[in-house]
Image (cartoon, rainbow, N blue to C red):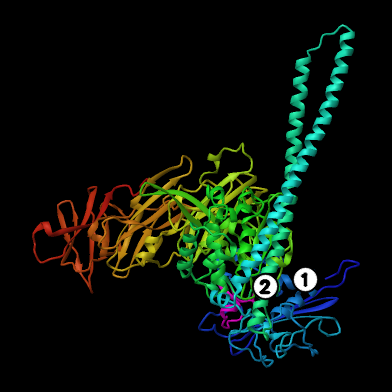
Amino acid sequence: MDEPEGELPVHIDVKEQHKKDGTYHYSFTYERATLYEFKFERAPRPASQDPCFRCNRRVLPQDQVRVDVLFHRQCFRCRICGLLLTMQTFYRNDANDSTDKEVYCKSHVGKNLRQVKSECIPLELDLDNISQHSQLNSIKYGGSSRKTSPKPVPSPRNHSPRGGSPTGTPMGHSPSGSSMVSVTPRTMNGSTFHSYNPNMTDFNASFGSTPGYHRPRPVLQSFQDFETSGVFESQSVLESRHREEEERLQRFLLEEREKEMRKLDDSIAVEKDRAAADLLSSFEHMSMSGSTPNLMAERERIEDHFRRMREDKLKVMMEKIATEEKTRTAKMLDRHGQEILLLIAKKDREVDRSAIFDHSMRPPVIPPETKKADLYKSPEVFRKLDERAIELTNKDYNSFTNLVKELTRDCQTELEKVRVIFRWVIAKDLGKHNVKEIVRPNSTASLLRGVRTGKETYHQLFKKLCNYAGLHCEIILGYSKGAGYKPGMRMDGTSFRNSWTAVSIDGNWRLVNCTWAARHVTGHKDDLPEIFYKYDEFYFLTDPEDHIYQHYPDDSQWQLIDIPLPFSEFLNLPVVKSPFFNYGLRFYSNYGATLTTDSGMVEIRLISYKILGFGHVLESYDKSVDARSLEGRVLLRHVKNEAIFTINLPKKGLYYFSIYTGDYWHSDCLESAASFLINCTEIMGAPSPPYPPVPFYGPTPIMESLNIETSNQIDPLIVSNGESLDISFKLSKEIKITHTFQYFDASDGSVSDIDRYVFLRSRTETGATYMVRCPKEGYYIFSLYAADENNETLDCAYRYLVICQQANQATNVFPKTFHKWQRCTLHEPVYGDLMTNKRYSFRLDVPQAVEVFLVIGDIWHHLKRKLGFTWEGNINTGKNPGTAKIYARFSVDRDASTFSHLLDYELIEDAETEI
């Protein structure tokens, strides 16, 4: 390929090798002034437990990245070029439907290896960045094709890479649970830019994150440690000095405020006197000229002008004063917090002079070693602490020392301390003043007057309490996608500015947002008013890769992720709310905030590990668009562990699409989960008709509770070209089932029942099979209803949407079935309309039947029993139109009342049947 003049040549080499033992080897080489190599090896068979999708080896818990399937952190790279990916930068190849579980970078999504080889397009590879993350996060096994001289490089994270070993691993041998990935950027002469040797111990290895070892902790941890070492007594003395300083600052700020008020009033008075003098002079001049102005009206106008001027200037001045007061208060509180931690550090040294870490040392700002799920599995583990925290919100304390002492009385770890402080802060109603603040000036109400008056925030209160408990806490400033923000909106200046906190637990920084977590709901219990405290668990120790969807810090290191996200990419992330994570949802691929389509169709796929209720809202950016034109434009279907939204837009334009979710199926119980901006630039052909008015297709919770499974049609969306369809289910014989089959007429929005085009062909002890026919083009809805043997009401268990693109003119109806048909199977004929005066072969399975008859008019034709419970007969339908009925007798009693009605056929002279 000819290279453009002035540009460096690009050479890409991709090699694949399948060895006899089943091992797969892959290498990607990219050469443009520098040489970059990416290699990985896949084992012949997946590990028996937690296999990595890329290399088939086991993934240890601390090294897992889960996106429907598991990856090692080091295997979570572009399948083609090896670019290290994050939860916000990976893409899925939707063109391959759900069969392709691999992950790709933005440059290679949707491309195959042949295209990559032929295009030779310069890739967006930052080799310095790649090599940096290689040395920090990957262990290179098996060496490389060129000799290098590795040198130990101290890790800025002060610990060995995840999955590493403190003693090192011999080159060429991979321990269980380790990734078989090699990434090597080199210069053209073969020397490596950066390298990492797993045999070398990292700088200050005691700060490592190797299995079984944690980051250093201070000497004093539990409540008992603080009590016995005298921390609380010393804190009480220091807090008294802090209270005096706070009061002095408040007096100074009050004096400053009064001084500014006097200056404002003086300046207004001077201007008003000057205006009055000008008015008097003007009045005298007009009197001399014979005019008679209205002096009172002019005076009122001037008074009103200066009143409005004072209000405007007062507002600006008060905002400026409030900002300065908050800034001074914040600086003072920061200093007080540092002094509290220094005091505790002094106690650390008194208890253990050889300690290498004390409370005065702030842990490095680096990503946490573990996930939130590794700290605790459920909030239930904190139930007693939560109850205590809520109980203590009703008690009064005269100092922060006593408050924290009571809060942490049952705490043994830093995690428990953070939890009880968090729950107390969000449960305490700080939004209104209390009469105790006046009657009892030493009450908790007065203790928290800074928050009540707006001079302190929830975050500053949380930080102060954490400091008293011996916890490092920082307030982070940045931008947030909060209330009022929609996908595609800009963020600049003071718009969408916000703050949150990060607290250190055992040397790991964790993200906490008390403001967004707090929910105060007023309710009634036993006719007595009561405040119910609800909270959002998501905002307690939020994982950084989830937190970045909503919050972007001014200082990128507080993202707490290995590869910080640029601000532009943060803006391009979908607007995701906490219920999205609380219900365990994940995006199947990396979707942007704005989804662009030139066909009018958009698909969004969510990974859901349990059956959830979903709702959605599609609205036009153009408010003049009639909302009714967007009804039926979204198709939701559940396929295995995915919820797939297909948006079918009626015309070009901008649209907002929002997803709601919850544990229940009622719309008023669903919570906002995610939202997107859709940019439709073109519509291919005529707009598609709207979908039927059905909330979703696929399984319901009934399906799961009755242990029913789909057998052949896994996807609830079926596209038909006129042929007969078989739909099978696996279910036990105790399950009662029935069905409906409906046709949706998109022209008028009507739904009609067409049950004669669906037939329960077989019902056995282990399953059921339906035959479905579509007599004309359009949308069809097949619904299965089920219940156990003890329940009379059958609920919807599964829904299919059948789209018939080409009708079969010869389509015929099915026989009509009756209750006793439930355990039978029809082999032939499977058409419900039979021609008169024609011979047909009848063959069906009727378990436990003693006799089976085909009744035409007054003639009973006896079917012969063959092997097992199969009954057969070759019978002429006769000359007269009418109904041919199949009966069976299941006992030896020949009383006619014991014959059970199974099927009905219609005998007609014209075989055509209208829907």
| Mark 2 nearby-residue class (10 Å; few <14, some 14–19, many ≥20) | some
Which SS class for mark 2?
helix
Spot occupied by residue 176 in the image (x, y as percentages of width and height): 58, 87
Residue 751 on image: x %, y %: 41, 45
Horizontal relation, residue 682 to residue 68: left or right? right
Q: Which residue is mark 2?
A: 343
Identify which amino acid the numbered label 1 is placed on.
Answer: Leu
Screen quadrant of the N terminus: bottom right
- Is 63 part of what is drawn in magenta? yes
Task: Compare marks 2 and 1 and give the one earlier in the sequence.
Answer: 1
Count of labels shown? 2
Q: Residue at x 63, y 69 (%)?
A: 235
Question: Range of the magenta residues?
Answer: 55-80
Relative to residue 688, is residue 768 depicted above or below?
Answer: below
Q: Check the image and report above or below for 252 versus 402.
A: above
Q: Is residue 356 left or right of residue 782?
A: right
Q: Residue at x 24, y 56 (%)?
A: 818
- Helix, strand or loop at label 1? It is loop
Label 1 CA crowd tier, 10 Å (few <14, some 14–19, many 20+): few
What's the amino acid at mark 2? Leu
Where residue 556 appears, as percent x and y from the top left, is: 73, 65
Q: Which mark is residue 125?
A: 1
Q: Kindly report the distance in space between the C-alpha atoms of the residues bearing marks 2 and 1.
A: 49 Å
